[in-house]
Structure formats: structure tokens, C-alpha cells
Amino acid sequence: MFYDRAKIFLKAGDGGNGLVSFRREKYVPQGGPNGGDGGRGASIYLIADHNLRTLLDFKMKQHYKAAKGENGQNSNKVGKSGKDLFLHVPLGTVVRYDGEEAVIADLVSDGQKVCVAKGGRGGRGNARFASNRDKAPEVAEKGEPGEEVWVRLELKVLADVGLVGMPNAGKSTLISRVSSAKPKIADYPFTTLEPNLGIVDLGDERTFCIADVPGLIENAHSGVGLGHHFLRHLERTKVLIHLIDMSGQEGRDPLEDFGIISEELRKYKEELWRKPRIIAANKMDLPESEENLARLKEKFGEEFEIFPIAAAAGGDLSPLLNRCYEIIQSAPVAEVRSEEEIKVTTFTPREPFSVRKEDDGVFIVEGPEVKKWIAMTDFGNEAAVRRLQRIFKAMGLDRGLRDAGARHGDTVIVYDLEFDFSD
């Protein structure tokens, strides 16, 4: 089964907890703190793999969780970092965060990878907090939580040539003739329900990849029929073969069919409509095809190259294929971006917290920085709680609550933490 879209949930590993520990040896009084840092949580990467053709694996399993970092140990031993998780996707996979249109990555070359969920850093052990003022700190950090994200995957097949045309125009027959692909072929519309890829070998090491895209109909750009669900698979092609049934079977006009598909390409994306396009006038072995071919050449002969063929009857297809290869060779080479370039980074000023007052008088505090520091605080450790209070004060949380109208004794809720405001 061919799957070209998927949505998956990724949870990167949490960092390991730092340790509160003191050196305890005979004849070494006041040995000092020696609690080690926690290890880094594992990150999750997507990596392009040329062996894959579909996103089926991500339909079978939607949730992925990476390993946590190990906790710090005494003697200043740092915990072991979690092993990064690599998820393999087909070439041509576009990655977006769910609910956003910005592209995180466009994975088009084998081995290309991108980090989509970053593991949390390990918490610092008490040895890291020693200072001239506090030589025996009893505070350590818990590990930072790893990122949790929903990610949308969208596959756009990597093919040099795309076959377009009305249902039953003969696209599957053509691709079966020119490659080893074995698509379903039958004498009724919409036989093809998923893209088929084939490799065309012209000899002398001249090869290219061709994609048979399911038949289009009027208003396909807006989702009618198989719609734009498959139109996007043509976006990466270098040349389009527009296949037309010249026999005019079932009362259809080949010229009208050509106009309909051309308009659908234009409405879906202007760049798609502007791609080099060759007309393959198919089914020339059937009655009335010659008459329709003459009409086609008269109207479009100066604008498009037209190749009369009879795919099912076994006619010579080499002129059409050789011309496709020439166009492919003259097309500009697509840029392959490095991992550092493929991630989209947009700077937006981020407030450390926000305060709102509920109808019952309770003040709610939210924000990524506040949430992080709460997760990294050991509330069973009094020194750690005092440190969190100092962090909140340095962030301006006290002032923010006052500005929002908080008074002495008012209830404040910060995620799972509830306390009375003390002015």
C-alpha cells in the first residue's frame, strides 16, 4: 500500500537528574560536593533513505519516544547520554510541525537528516553549584524535559518525468511499456489509485525515473476526484508527458481534455503549468485518431512538441523517450541543502511567562521558561525550592503578578504548582 502522508508524535528524551553528593573518605573531613551532572536526553532525527518508497511505517506506528539520559553519580561522574533515535523516511519527504506551514526540512538526498525533537540537557549536580559563598551546596537540578512535537510528513515522489492526463488515457500502459513497473491496467477509469514509479533505460547508461500519476479530472486542483492529493507528486519533475486519448472514445473531445488538464495544472500551481511539457498523442491505432491528431497539431503544434504513439499496440516510443532525456539533461540541477540549511528558523521574541486572572480570583502563570524551571526543580529539596524562588524573582514574576493585581494571600497556580502570593 502506498502512503504519502502521515502525522506522528515525537517525544525526545529527558535529561538525566544531577546528583547531590559529598565526598566521604576517612581522614578527608569536609571533602566537598562531588555530585555529577545528568546525561543528555536523546534527540529524534529524520533521515532520508533511498530504500523506502512509502510512509506506511508511520501509519502503523504513530508515537515515538527517545531514551532518557542517565542520572549523575558521585565522584563527579556524568550520567550517560541517551542514544539518539533515527527514523528513516523516503527521499522527497517534506517535514512540517503540525498546525504550521513552514517547512522544517525537505529531504531529497540519501542520508540527509534533520533534528525534529531535541533532547533535554542533563541537570547539573551539586558540584557545579559550589562557590566561595557556598562551598557545600545541597542543590542539584533535575533533567530538562525533551521536546514533544506532532510532525506532519508529506511525500512528494522524486521523478524526472511525470505522466498526466485524463483517466483511461493510457498512462499505466505507457509506463509498463517503457519500464519494469507493473501497474494495474484495465479498461475503465481510475484504474490507477496511487503513483507508480518506473526506471526507463535507454542504453549507454542513459536512464531516468518516470511517475504515473492517477488520472485527473476537471477541478482536480480543488480536490475533486483524486485531486491535489496526487498533483503534488508532479512538483519535483523536470518534464511532463501530457498523454491524450486521440480516439475520442465515450464521446470525449481530445482537444477539450487537453485544455481541462492544462487548466488544472495552472490552477494548482503556476510553476507546474510552466514546466516543459510534451504531448503524447496516444491510441493512434484506433479510428478517428488521425483526424483528431490533425486538429491537435493545427491548434497546439507551434506551442508543444507532439509525438503520435500507440502504447498498447506496441508502437515505437523511442523518439518520445529520447526527447524526454534531452530535456532532463538540460534542466537546471536542483540544489541539495545541508542539514544546517534545511531547518527553518524564525526569530520571534518570547516572553518568559504570562499572567492572567481567572473569574474566581486565581492567578494563572504560564510560559515555556517557567515550565522548564519547574520541571528541573526537585521539590523534595529545600535548597532547590529556594533556588527556584530566586529564579522566579530574577525573571520578574513577582513584579508581573503585582502588575496583574495580585495581593498578599491570593492564590497563584503555575502548572502543577499552587501557592499563596506573599507580598
Image (spheres, rainbow, N blue to C red):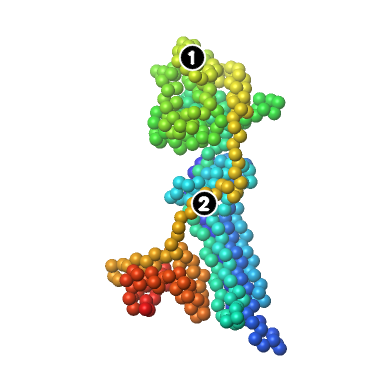
* Quarter of the image where the C terminus is located: bottom left
In the picture, the disc for residue 297 is 1
Instruction: Tell me if mark 1 has few (under 14), some (14-19) or many (20+) residues whose alpha carbon lies within 10 angstroms of its own.
Output: some
- Give me the residue at 33% from left, 76% from top: 407
Instruction: Tell me if mark 2 has few (under 14), some (14-19) or many (20+) residues whose alpha carbon lies within 10 angstroms of its own.
Output: few
Determine the residue located farthest toward the left in the rendered image: 359
Check disc 2 and report the residue beneath it.
345
> Which quadrant would residue 260 be assigned to in this image?
top left
> Which quadrant would residue 419 be assigned to in this image?
bottom left
- Give me the residue at 55% from left, 32% from top: 237
Name the one closer to the observer, 354 or 83.
354
Q: Residue 215 placed where, x, y %?
A: 47, 29
Q: Is residue 373 visible?
A: yes
Q: Residue 233 placed where, x, y %?
A: 51, 36
- Give me the residue at 59% from left, 36% from top: 334
Point out the frontmost of discs 2 and 1.
Answer: 2
Of label 2 and label 1, which has the lower sequence position? 1
Cα gap from disc 2 to disc 1, whole angstroms: 50 Å
At label 2, the amino acid type is Thr
Q: Can residue 282 be seen in this view?
A: no
Name the one closer to the observer, 187 or 252.
252
At label 1, the amino acid type is Lys
Q: Residue 124 placed where, x, y %?
A: 58, 71
In the picture, the disc for residue 219 is none
- Give me the residue at 64% from left, 82% from top: 32
Q: Residue 364 placed where, x, y %?
A: 36, 68
At numbered mark 1, what does the secondary structure look like: helix, strand or loop? helix
- Total tally of numbered discs in the picture: 2
> Which quadrant would residue 259 be assigned to in this image?
top left
At numbered mark 2, what does the secondary structure look like: helix, strand or loop? loop
